[in-house]
Amino acid sequence: MGQFIIITASNQENLKLAKKVADRVLSKGHFVEIVDILDLKWPLFDPTQETQELQKREIEEQILKLQSSNASIWIAPEYNGGLPPAWSNFLAWISKSGDDFRAAFNGKVGAIMSFSGSGTNVLQFMRLQLSYLGMSILGRQILANYSKPAKEESIDTILEELIVKST
């Protein structure tokens, strides 16, 4: 059994998509945890406030979750043609904390998804940033919206590839 982590940067439709994906992961007999980064309520990253504003333990806990997962799934909406602020804030805190944050990304396999009206930009930005951090992102991705919901078959195809590449 593998350990999956789903990181979502929305508590609305993208969180619903995350739960749908988590159900599919569980149906395949794997463990999964959803981390809604909005629930973390981390303050805006400021390098001068690093140690004062946020307990290092909280950040290291998220780094450990990423490190111990076999694969990760990143789900975010498109905001003004780009990444949501919570996404950037999360990665800023992660990248500036812990003894080896890169171990959460280097050699790891991941997938990207979005529930957005447009969504093409956010998927490109997620792919670029996660690849830059060392993660291998699957070529296949999911872009869903109200008129084109995510299909279970598409989710399953991505999950099967993640399972193969992460073991």
Image (spheres, rainbow, N blue to C red):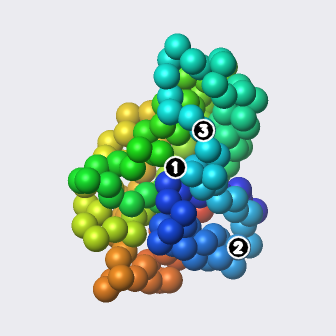
Task: From the top left corner, tell me how far across and down residue 46 is, in percent.
Answer: 49, 22
Q: Residue at x 29, y 63 (%)?
A: 119
Looking at the rendered structure, which numbered label has been put on residue 109? 1
Q: Disc 1 or disc 3, which is closer to the eye?
A: 3
Question: Badge 2: few (under 14), some or many (20 or more) residues near its Cα, within 10 Å?
Answer: few
Q: Amino acid at mark 3?
A: Trp
Q: Residues within 10 Å of mark 3 (few under 14, many from 20)?
A: some
Residue 120, horizontal then vertical, whole percent = 25, 61
The residue labelled by disc 3 is: 42
User: How far is the residue under mark 1 from the one under mark 2?
Assistant: 18 Å
Pointer 2 with pointer 3, Cβ within 8 A: no
Note whether residue 142 is visible. Answer: no
Instruction: Looking at the picture, tell me which residue is in the foreground, 149 or 66.
Output: 149
User: Circle 1 — which element?
Assistant: strand
| Residue that badge 2 annotates | 26
Look at the picture and state if 158 lies above or below 55.
below
Q: Amino acid at mark 2?
A: Leu
Instruction: Judge by depth and name the residue closer to the eye, 5 or 115.
Output: 115
Helix, strand or loop under label 3 = loop
C-alpha gap between disc 1 and disc 3: 26 Å
User: Is residue 57 visible from the viewing direction of this image?
Assistant: yes
In the displayed structure image, the side of residue 99 where residue 115 appears, left or right: left
Residue 136 point in image, percent of width and height: 44, 45
Residue at (71% x, 25% y) in the render: 56
Name the image quarter holding residue 108: top right
Number of the front mark, 1 or 2: 2
